[in-house]
Image (cartoon, helix red, strand yellow):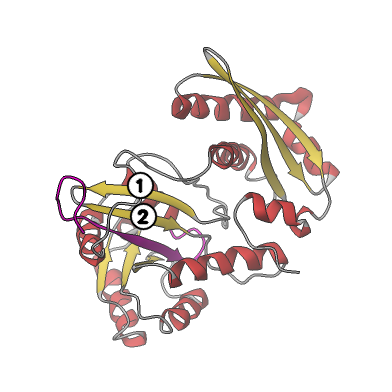
Amino acid sequence: MLNKNNEQTRCGFVALIGATNSGKSTLLNTILATKVSITSHKVQTTRNQIRGVKTDGDTQMVFIDTPGIFNPKGKFDKAMVSSAWSAMNDSDCVIFLLDAHKGITPTFDNIVKHLRTIKTPIALCLNKVDLLDKEKLLKLTSDIMKIAPDLFREIFMISALQNDGVGDMMNWIKGQMPESPFFFDRDTKTDLPLELHLAEITREKVYALLHQELPYSIAIKTDSIEEEKNSFTVKQTIYTSQENHKSIIIGERGAKIKAIGIKAREEMAFIMGKKVNLFLFVKVKENWRDVPEFFTDIGLDFKK
């Protein structure tokens, strides 16, 4: 496909698939050389399909950082996993990211089973290879080839955190992109709505500061963004399902919520290019995972 400068261009979608905490969000941030997806030691931190855009010369690649694959229980969990599978079906190629340090797990077998049902080119990326010695890595590769000998077009060994081996993977992805005009401007990094992007930033800070104290029963909504001459005023609500979680988030004399606000505000100011005045509120909303509004706010389908 020729662009306005009569140049041949390619553009397509790349689904990043893997178990929770396999490093998909870290890989996407490394590819884009900026942060569009939150990372955390907690599993299941990516809840929706976050698209990151990488333009390299005449090729544009739209990466979809999907929720991690796990055994879903409630409606919210099922919607997250369904979102991951749908991204895989709609992409031009799939990157299956496997935590090499954890090796082959039941989740691996489940993902392979689904991957066998699609015709999209698939590459396996063994991530965190810097944590394994060569002998264990070779054995893992051999075991995978016995399980799925004809499934993967390529196998890459990478460290997303160290940006090691990512270049070879990117070259392969470029070769899978179909002829097409670009979907986004060259300087676009993500199509994530600003309201959701800011909510994701705050959610990451909550997990970073309270990961040993707080479970997953929180949701964050950006209520308003007001631009002024030299600053932005952002108001957000942190929803939790239990009253005791509210006190954990606020902390003694408001110490925790203040620390969360400081960290979130710094990152927001960096991406928005202005000072940010951030106001955080904490509310208890029981069973928020069953409320359709919280599904649609982050692009998930609510199924009764």
Magenta range is 1-23
Q: Neighbour class for label 2 at 10 Å: few (<14), some, many (≥20)?
A: many
Q: Classify residue 241 as left or right of residue 294.
A: right
Q: Main secondary structure of the magenta part?
A: loop
Quarter the N terminus occupies: bottom left
Q: Is residue 288 visible?
A: yes
The residue closer to the viewer here, 121 or 256, is 121
The residue closer to the viewer here, 168 or 208, is 168
The residue closer to the viewer here, 20 or 173, is 173
4 is within the stretch colored magenta: yes
Q: Position of residue 88 (x, y in %)?
A: 44, 69
Q: Residue at x 22, y 60 (%)?
A: 174
At label 1, the amino acid type is: Phe
Q: Residue at x 78, y 43 (%)?
A: 245
**What secondary structure is marked by label 2?**
strand
Up/down of 33 relative to 233, above or below: below
C-alpha separation, residue under disc 1 versus residue under disc 2: 9 Å
Q: Which residue is mark 2?
A: 62
Q: Position of residue 230 (x, y in %)?
A: 52, 12
Q: Position of residue 76 (x, y in %)?
A: 68, 62
- Which of the labelled discs sits on residue 184, or is there none? 1
Up/down of 281 relative to 148, above or below: above
User: In front: mark 1 or mark 2?
Assistant: 1
- Which of the labelled discs sits on residue 155, or is there none? none
Q: Residue at x 59, y 24 (%)?
A: 262
Up/down of 213 relative to 260, above or below: below
Whether tag 1 and tag 2 are in contact, CB under 8 A, the answer is: yes
